[in-house]
Image (cartoon, coloured by chain):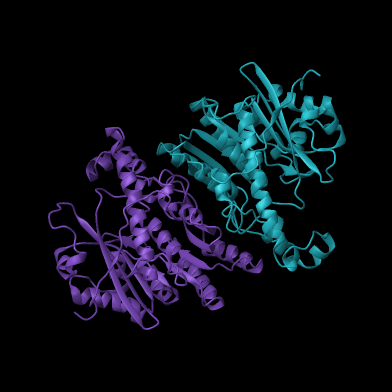
Chain colours: A purple, B cyan
Amino acid sequence: MAKGKGRILSIQSHVAYGYVGGKAAVFPLQCLGYDVDVVNTVNFSNHSGYGRFGGPRASADELNQIFSIMEQNELLRPDRLLTGYVPGAEATAAVTALAKKLREHNPELIYLLDPVLGDSGRLYVAPEVVPIYRDALPLATIITPNWFEVEVLTEVKMTDAASLRKALWTLHEKYRVPHVVISSIPLKSWLTDLLPAHLRPPTTSDVDYLACIASSQSDGVSSVHAKCFPCLPGYFSGVGDLFSALVLAHFDEANIEGQASGETPLSYAASQAVSKTHAILSLTHEAASALPEDERQATDEELDAREPMRKIKRMRGRELRLIQGQDIIRGTQPIDYKKLEPWAGFWTV
Amino acid sequence: MAKGKGRILSIQSHVAYGYVGGKAAVFPLQCLGYDVDVVNTVNFSNHSGYGRFGGPRASADELNQIFSIMEQNELLRPDRLLTGYVPGAEATAAVTALAKKLREHNPELIYLLDPVLGDSGRLYVAPEVVPIYRDALPLATIITPNWFEVEVLTEVKMTDAASLRKALWTLHEKYRVPHVVISSIPLKSWLTDLLPAHLRPPTTSDVDYLACIASSQSDGVSSVHAKCFPCLPGYFSGVGDLFSALVLAHFDEANIEGQASGETPLSYAASQAVSKTHAILSLTHEAASALPEDERQATDEELDAREPMRKIKRMRGRELRLIQGQDIIRGTQPIDYKKLEPWAGFWTV
């Protein structure tokens, strides 16, 4: 069991009920041996996907007050930094200013920036937040955008080999991010065709697949890895927050022991994160499927609008089974290892 | 490993750095298999013992907003309730009103009320908070006051057998609390003399001892158990919060399997809590002792006042090693079991 892996400062949302933001990230990091300093950017009742939610948001001033006292007390010396959802442009700027200070103070800081901007083509945040995130990118060690966040940040729509390369190139070269994990990108035909044969999912399958792509450009070494995995039906909240926490927890440039051949520190971390996240999702899907029918009714915008509890019950039933799956997170329960494989010739072919 | 023990609503303080309040309670409860809904009554940088601290306090209105939305969303149905530090009288009254509602809605609710009022003769809270706690006592299943909080709540100074009995009687009979655990009470000579011989610590020891006393009066059955344990030098913060969480986690009236002979649901829970808390404290003490001298200078009010960092570094060094000791909490690392023993004739001798 991990005994003291170091200290992570996690800055993201808090919800009383359920598992998104810090509630999806902190417990896994603690289980994996990290001391986690937890700054809550909001204190909500539940996540916004329920439709009805509320509670106070931290202002930029309140965040700065907490950071400032921690700094004065010499409590602001994390080995790693994890940032997720921050409400509004001013608070986002405050978090970015802190990241800048921590980076200047400690060049070895491992900063995982999860640019929580939106999903599936829809922006969650005000448009003025986007340039603040772009400014923050050069501070990051690792970023974990979903496909939509890649497109928003790079202003490149990914539709073919050239645009996928251009988007990744933009993140690495223009924004100087050494490690990028695109947490999930739908496996449309252009992407399937592009993948080397050994990375493609079985053609006989009739379920949708997603790909996770991990790309490193650091110290002159470039590598791209990928893995396809089946998409579970319906929407689960907090998955990206859990995934990012697991990438950060398992990323270790100094210690490559235990990494199988062909793995890099990033691909190893992403493989662990994909494997554990998928196992937790499977557990969650299974538990949700066993609920009474009235708590697992499919999305129907019209019916959901007429009867808010219909959606709320669905959301409640689909909260991540993080507690029940803690042995998965800890690595003491065997799961299928979804190893990201090298994507040879990604940049050149 | 525990798979889904139920749902606990925890309402207490949050600190970004270190382990007090919710940061000392929630992770242990999660490790022990509970889903924990977490309402933060304050969001501070660090605990107040550092001298310098800050961050927003939740107002009664903000707490009520969160409770109200959770209720509307049918997310307010915990099996257990844990309340700790709440800032100020209005917010305390809001939490008490919630406890009342939950108790009315679910007579089976297991409510552990930790009356965080003060320690070692000093009140932490405004005096007007005390009567609100007294009003809340009849709602509780278990309370876990320290000796000072017992005295404040009951207005009985404990100095001999009669006053100890009167204090406990007041909690059970006047305030109708079925289960009381006095988490720690210094073993002064009157208490040592009062204890049955088999419960006394070794007379050869030159360290100070504390006693934990667990008293149940429910369903017409009365039992008192106790255990003495050596006091570790210096002050550690968050110990009471960890202890209360462990009592709640291990309290199970339905399942007495695994409880040794002479144990009751309360004495079993208190034994587990004393044992694990003491083991975590020993680990913390050991780690703190190994720090550079400048981070572990003894309390000296004059020097501490002149040089705030002197105290701050001491506090930082004495934060609970909860993450490093998580196998103790989980019960997978063997520790000395400090079993509370029956105190026969407590009420009559």
- Name the residue at 50% across, 38% down: B8
The image shows residue A246, relative to residue A128, as above or below, that is above
The image shows residue A82, relative to residue B131, as above or below, that is below
Q: Is residue B100 left or right of residue B193?
A: left
Q: Give the quarter of the figure containing the C terminus of chain A.
A: bottom left
* Nearest to the observer: residue B316 or residue B202: B202
* Residue closest to the far bottom: A220
Tell me if residue B103 can be seen.
yes
Q: Residue A39: percent from the left, percent from the top?
A: 53, 59
- Name the residue at 49% across, 43% down: B36
* Nearest to the observer: residue B85 or residue B334: B334
* Residue closest to the far left: A204
The image shows residue B182, relative to residue B236, as above or below, that is above
Q: Residue A139: percent from the left, percent from the top?
A: 45, 75
* Nearest to the observer: residue B126 or residue A317: A317
Q: Residue A322: percent from the left, percent from the top?
A: 41, 47
- Name the residue at 43% across, 55% down: A21
Total tally of numbered discs in the picture: 0
Q: Is residue B315 left or right of residue B187?
A: left
Tell me if residue B86 can be seen.
no
Q: Residue B245: percent from the left, percent from the top?
A: 59, 41
